[in-house]
Amino acid sequence: MQGTDDELVMFERDGAPPLPASTAEGFVANDGARIWYAVHGAGPAVILLHGGLGNAGNWGYQVPALVQSGRMVVVVDSRGHGHSTRDAVPFGYARMAGDVLSVMDHLGLETASFVGWSDGACTALILADKHPQRVSGVFFFACNMDPSGALPFKPTPVIDRCFSRHRQDYQALSATPHDFETFVADVSHMMESEPNYSAEQLAGIKVPVAVVIGENDEFIRRDHADYLARTIPGAELVVLPGVSHFAPLQRPELFNRAVLDFLDRID
């Protein structure tokens, strides 16, 4: 039985549980960066894309549950995050989508389902838009697709604890461990300027999508999630009670049930 960590006290102190032993892991060179990935389990492929400033290890509660459900789980460190490197070109969600495609090509995956969290959700939906033949569906958690969807930033103790853990992990994993402040500034610039999807573009997405938001999300407007669910054809809206932007860490069983419900419907 997994507990709760609503205030992220355990996450700040210990991080998420370690990922289980992988069946394969390594780096793929793409577009000026080396992108780290790991594969767990066997079955239909699910790719997990973490949030901005985080890393694949943040999925420590999700990977075992998905493997136990009979799926192959691929985790990826976004460029410049975790073990992955970056070049001097500014961050961009389209570039990150290209990185994910390069991992899929390397692993011989023609299609996969995606679970995206915050920045990872945006990357997954861009993949669904630009490469729908590669995407079986997108569990789109805690993200906006245009600037109007973001709430004004207000610091909280929970956000501070998450940021503290991201700093610790960056310094432990990154090839440039002393560049955390530059990394934060560059990722923040991407978040402030992208994405810029129109309603027309959203209406052109043809893969199954679940738009998911925590009841108490600190960063994303609830009415924006409503708008996305109305505008993306066939999308469903899922509101997770009692959690915020950090639901995969706060109440893993609640989050995992929602993910598995979605995957079971589209597999």
Image (spheres, rainbow, N blue to C red):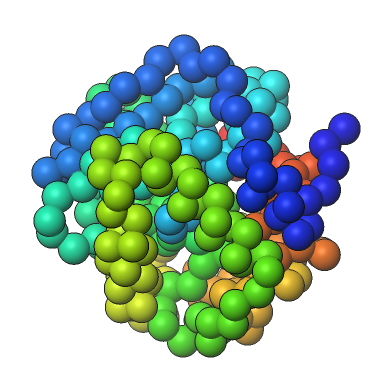
Q: Is residue 253 above or below residue 199?
A: above
Q: In the picture provided, is 155 more to the left or to the right than 129?
A: right
Most extreme residue toward the front, as rendered?
Answer: 178
Q: Is residue 263 above or below residue 124?
A: above
**Residue at 28% over, 54% down:** 179
Whether residue 71 is visible here, answered yes or no, is no
Q: How many marks?
A: 0
Residue 218: quarter of image: bottom right
* Front in this rendered view, residue 127 or 174: 174
Most extreme residue toward the top, as rendered?
Answer: 23
**Residue at 49% over, 17% down:** 22
**Residue at 36% over, 46% down:** 81
Residue 267 in the image, given as x and y percentages of width and height: 59, 35
* Front in this rendered view, residue 64 or 171: 171
Residue 87 in the image, given as x and y percentages of width and height: 14, 50
**Residue at 66% over, 74% down:** 156
Q: In the picture provided, is 78 more to the left or to the right than 68?
A: left
Residue 264 in the image, given as x and y percentages of width and height: 68, 37
Whether residue 60 is visible here, answered yes or no, is yes
Q: In the picture provided, is 28 more to the left or to the right than 174?
A: left
Q: In the picture provided, is 260 more to the left or to the right than 63?
A: right
Residue 180: quarter of image: bottom left
- Quadrant of the rendering where the N terminus is positioned: top right
Residue 223: quarter of image: bottom right
Residue 36 in the image, given as x and y percentages of width and height: 33, 32
* Front in this rendered view, residue 11 or 260: 11
